[in-house]
Image (spheres, rainbow, N blue to C red):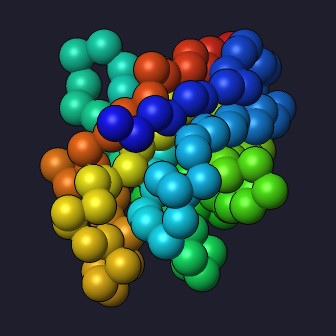
C-alpha cells in the first residue's frame, strides 16, 4: 500500500504564499505521476497540478497557472506545491495523489488532472486564505 503524507497547509492572507509537500517511499516515488487536488465542501475534487517524477514534466489547471508551481524533491521522495499570490478562492483541503503501478502511468502522454485515475490519496492538508 502506497502512503502519501502531506504537510505545509495553514492560514494565509490573500497575496501570500504557502508551500505544500507530499512525501512517499522511494519505490512509490519512482517514475510515476503525482498530482495535487483540492476540494471544498459540496464541490467535486479539482485537479490543479501534476508532475511526472521521472522527468519533471508538469501540467496545471487554468485556475492556478502562473501562481502555483509543482516540483519534485528527489532527495526526499516528495513533490511540493509552491502556492504564490494566494486568493480566497484557493482555500480548500489539498490532497496529494498517485496512480497504482498497474495503470502504467509512464505510458501516458501527460499526467492527467482527472481524479478517477489516481488510486492513492493522502489525508489532506487544509489551506485557508483570508481576504
Q: Is residue 4 above or below residue 55?
A: above
Q: In this view, does 41 lie above or below 22?
A: above
Q: Is residue 71 above or below residue 35?
A: below
- Is 64 on the left or on the right of 8, as rendered? left
Q: Percent position (x, y) of residue 72?
A: 69, 61
The image quadrant of residue 131 is top right
The image quadrant of residue 108 is bottom left
Residue at 56%, 29% (x, y): give it. 5
Q: Percent position (x, y) of residue 107?
A: 29, 84
- Is 1 on the left or on the right of 16, as rendered? left
Residue at 48%, 45% (x, y): give it. 36
Q: In which quarter of the image is the N terminus?
A: top left
Residue closer to the observer: 47 or 56: 56
Q: Percent position (x, y) of residue 55?
A: 60, 81
- Is 8 on the left or on the right of 47, as rendered? right
Residue at 60%, 53% (x, y): give it. 26
Q: Can residue 15 be seen in this view?
A: no
Q: Can residue 75 be seen in this view?
A: yes
Number of numbered markers: 0
- Is 131 on the left or on the right of 96, as rendered? right
Q: Percent position (x, y) of residue 126?
A: 56, 16
Residue at 37%, 20% (x, y): give it. 40
Residue closer to the observer: 123 or 104: 104
Amino acid at each position: 500500500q502506497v502512503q502519501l503524507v502531506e504537510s505545509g497547509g495553514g492560514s494565509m492572507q490573500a497575496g501570500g504564499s504557502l508551500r505544500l509537500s507530499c512525501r512517499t517511499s522511494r519505490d512509490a516515488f519512482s517514475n510515476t505521476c503525482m498530482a495535487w487536488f483540492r476540494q471544498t465542501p459540496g464541490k467535486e475534487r479539482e485537479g490543479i497540478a501534476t508532475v511526472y517524477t521521472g522527468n519533471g514534466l508538469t501540467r496545471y489547471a487554468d485556475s492556478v497557472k502562473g501562481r502555483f508551481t509543482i516540483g519534485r524533491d528527489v532527495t526526499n521522495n516528495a513533490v511540493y506545491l509552491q502556492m504564490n499570490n494566494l486568493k480566497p478562492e484557493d482555500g480548500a483541503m489539498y490532497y496529494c495523489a498517485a496512480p497504482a503501478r498497474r495503470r502504467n502511468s509512464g505510458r501516458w502522454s501527460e499526467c492527467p488532472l482527472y481524479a478517477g485515475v489516481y488510486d492513492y490519496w493522502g489525508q489532506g492538508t487544509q489551506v485557508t486564505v483570508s481576504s
